[in-house]
Amino acid sequence: MPVSRPAGDESADRSNSRDALPINELFTSLQGEGTLAGVPSTFVRTSGCNLRCWFCDSYHTSWEPSHEWRSLESILEAVEERDPAHVVLTGGEPLLYDASVDLLSALADRGYHTTVETNGTIYREAPIDLVSISPKLAGSNPTADRVPDGVDPDVATRWADRHDRERIDLEALVALVESYDFQLKFVVEDEGDISGVLEILTDLRGAASVSIPDEDVLLMPEGATRERLAETRSRVADLAMAHGFRYTPRLHVDLWNDAPET
Ligand SMILES: C[S@@+](CC[C@H](N)C(=O)[O-])C[C@H]1O[C@@H](n2cnc3c(N)ncnc32)[C@H](O)[C@@H]1O
Ligand SMILES: Nc1nc2[nH]cc(C(=O)O)c2c(=O)[nH]1
Ligand code: SF4
Ligand SMILES: [Mg+2]
């Protein structure tokens, strides 16, 4: 059972369905982020999220969710038709769903290496080879001025309090790092984000029974497009060096910009 189970959104009415998931896209690409960057992987992207980051590059899973409910059987079939031995379960927030646990179990039974991309607000027990946790900093909060193109500023304002209140759940973060091999991958724009990173690390190191070395902490430049990454990447690389953290590129954005299914 999840340590904390925030209510989901419009997808959550079926969130305890055990044999299907709301799938936004399923595709093969190179892992673009983190310690496995460059590894051919099949991505399974669920739709629905409990947060609303202003910068979300997967807008159609959060601000304007779209998906088809697919049976686990059909998801597994689609994965097995493809070559990669690595599967990345992402979203949206994939740990909203009971069926994600069943999917991960079925993938483990078939010998796949699984990475789960999560915002770190929900813990579930599942066979996960790498949990890629991206805790959200205050800079992710939506405001009337910081909202994805096309979203009504009033909708962003209505989400602001809930997003800020729910973006960090220390209990869930502790359970995730204590249970799985992990990486902590912070989306950073500039120096102003670093105090938030340090604060989360202090709290987590104080509460968790496992060590959290700086080499498992990655700074990732904010940017859903090549144009935006050109503004953020060298600044964020300098911050990683200055603080002794890792830097992760966003290979897929360099290679394919913001194309879907990449
Ligand atoms: C779309 S999220 C889905 C998984 C989960 N909801 C999360 O946030 O970790 C996948 C990854 O993309 C990152 N991400 C989303 N939008 C981004 C942006 N504009 N720039 C950099 N990283 C971004 C997230 O922080 C996360 O690491
Ligand atoms: N190529 C590629 N790598 C990724 N790593 C994490 C992703 C995600 O959206 O979770 C992602 C993605 O969307 N594409
Ligand atoms: S938590 Fe992840 S999916 Fe949800 S809004 Fe933020 S980046 Fe998008
Ligand atoms: Mg992505």
Image (cartoon, rainbow, N blue to C red):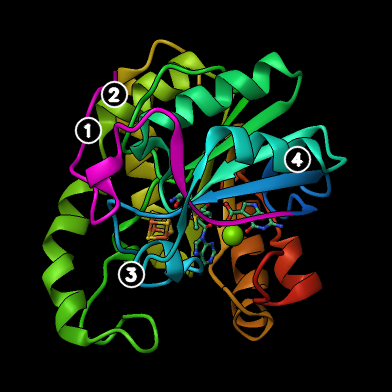
- Residue at 34 percent of width and 51 percent of height: 196
Mark 3 or 2, nearer chain start: 2
Give the side of residue 12 with respect to residue 115, left or right.
left
Q: Identify the residue shown where x is 49% and y is 18%.
A: 126
The vertical placement of 162 against 261, above or below, is above
Residue located beneath label 3 in the image? 63
- The mark lying in front, picked from 4 and 2, is 2
Residue 177, how many percent across, how many down? 46, 22
Residue at left 55%, top 51%?
Answer: 45
Q: Closer to the camera, 196 or 87?
A: 87
Amino acid carrying label 2: it is: Pro
Per the image, label 3 sits on a secondary structure element best described as: loop
Tag 4: amino acid:
Leu
Mark whose residue sits in front, 1 or 4: 1
Q: Pointers 1 and 3 in contact (CB under 8 A)?
A: no
Direction top: furthest residue: 209
Residue placed under numbered mark 1 in the picture: 5
Query: Label 2 crowding class (10 Å Cα cut-off): few <14, some 14-19, many 20+?
Result: some
10 Å crowding of disc 3: few (<14), some (14-19), many (20+): many
The residue singled out by tag 2 in the image is 2
The residue singled out by tag 4 in the image is 36
Q: Residue at x 82, y 32 (%)?
A: 85
- Of the numbered discs 4 and 2, the one sitting upstream in the chain is 2
Q: From mark 1 to mark 3, how far is it between C-alphas? A: 20 Å
Residue 235 image-quadrant placement: bottom right
Of mark 1 and mark 3, the one earlier in the sequence is: 1
